[in-house]
Amino acid sequence: MSTHIKKIGFLFLSFALMFLACDTEESIEITSPDPAFILQQPGISNVFLNFGTPDNAALSVAWNDEVTGSTSYDVEMSLDADFSSSVNLGNVSTNSFSISVQDLNHAIRNAGATTFRDVAVYMRINAGGTLSNSVQYLVTTYPVEVPQVSSPANNDSFVLALATLNDIAMTANWSDDVLSSTLGIEITYTIEAAIAGTNFALPVSVGQVTNDTTLSTTHSDLNAVVIGIGLTPDTAGDVDLRIVARNTNVNGNTLERFSETITVSITPYSVSFPFLYMVGDATTPGWDNNNNNTPIFRDQDVPNNYVFTGYFGVGAFKLLEVKGQWQPQWGTNDGSTLAVNTGSGSDPGTFNVGTAGYYTYTFTTVGEGGNFTVTPYDASSAPTYPTMGIIGDATPDGWSSDTDFTQDPNNPHLWYLNGVTLTNGGSMLIRANDVWPPDSNAAIWRHTGSQELYGMARLDNDGGDNIPFNEPTGTYDIWFNDLDGNYVIIAQ
């Protein structure tokens, strides 16, 4: 009896479970997720913008659009999560977007970011008014804002005087938000000067400071700068000034920011620049400071510019202002700028020549500094002359015969004539081979307008001006370079 009851109970339970299972199965409903317009979260949300790679991709974003069916997407950026002021970074027809380091940095700085490190940047996608979610990045930017000059002001005037050469002539002041930021970088500020209207084609440094916003310059130093760029002594001339901010990253990339240009009037005083003579084992006189040392030739238009094209042996050299004296002595400590020991400091380093050959050196002195360049020179096709001399009524033998130069033993293109008497009011020509045109061996160098005892003569057999000599009658040394026509006449 009990066995039957158990069987009936089991059957009843089975039917109940079957009916329950059928009821449950009928109630299951399979659903799909709602269509979405989703900007994908970035894998890396911290972005460092390196000014040394401006064209590299700073970041890339991608999104899924199952809502709009659009083929035109605006990528928007904001510095606040509410996008109260958004910036359009670009428009694309695909579902991804990349932006360069330079473009993202400018967008963030122009949007009004007041800090540089970990700037919160929000991005979203706009498809014709339908907006995606937004994502956040923390971006470290670099400065694009320029220094703001507060003095001098446009049209300020400065009259320089020899009597106050060590007094302060001009003080420049500026501001730069980067210095008060958390970037913690070292910034060098350089004041550059150039003739007004030349767009700083040939800028000259007035001076520089590091992590400071003021710089003063003396009458003497400022005078050397403006004479060097071409102002005329005792005549007011317009000069453009600007502040250049430079900082260098760990990769050696340098960022430059230029202030607006300030134009001032400066009246320089007359000053003479010294002759400079080479000494060192890369040159003919060696390390003897009184051995007929070769002078550096002078630019007839810019008195603080010096140039020499010629042969240098392996070794080194320096420049002296007075033969027979080791100071003032010019050299370089960094391979690009000039340094000088006027007699009260330490001697600078040498100009080094690693490979023997012909080179052109240019030197621009500014106060107790300046800069120089060196480039190889190809003299392989330059003619060599058996003899070279001067002829004319300023010379010892008049127009009847040449007074010959001596040829440098290491450089067949360099000539010198020591202790020659020149006569006031006369003139001369520089002549090769003791012959006149139309002789095929003739080569005549003529005047190009220099008002100084130095200049660049022009090789011209067809005629032209003689080189005038308007200095007092006396004894002079003359040096001549037939590679470029440079000459210099030095009183004894």
Image (tube, rainbow, N blue to C red):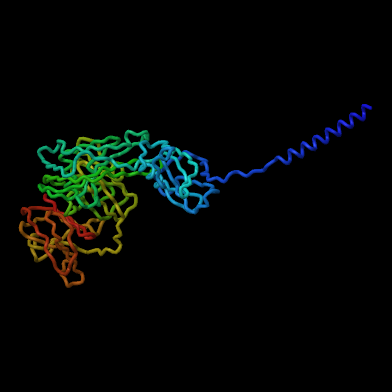
Q: Residue at x 15, y 45 (%)?
A: 265
Q: Residue at x 9, y 57 (%)?
A: 469
Position in image of residue 485 (x %, y %): 20, 60
Position in image of residue 151 (x %, y %): 20, 39
**Quadrant the N terminus occupies:** top right
The total number of labels drawn is: 0
Is 46 in front, or is 400? Answer: 46
Position in image of residue 283 (x %, y %): 26, 50
* Image: 121 above or below 420: above
Is 22 in front, or is 474? Answer: 22
Does any portion of residue 166 appear in the rendered image? yes
Instruction: Check the image and name the residue furthest to the bottom.
Output: 438
Position in image of residue 286 (x %, y %): 25, 47
Give the side of residue 485 with respect to residue 469, left or right.
right
Give the side of residue 449 with respect to residue 214, left or right.
left
Does any portion of residue 295 appear in the rendered image? no
Query: Looking at the rendering, which quadrant does residue 248 occupy?
Result: top left
* Image: 418 above or below 369: below
Instruction: Check the image and name the residue furthest to the right.
Output: 1
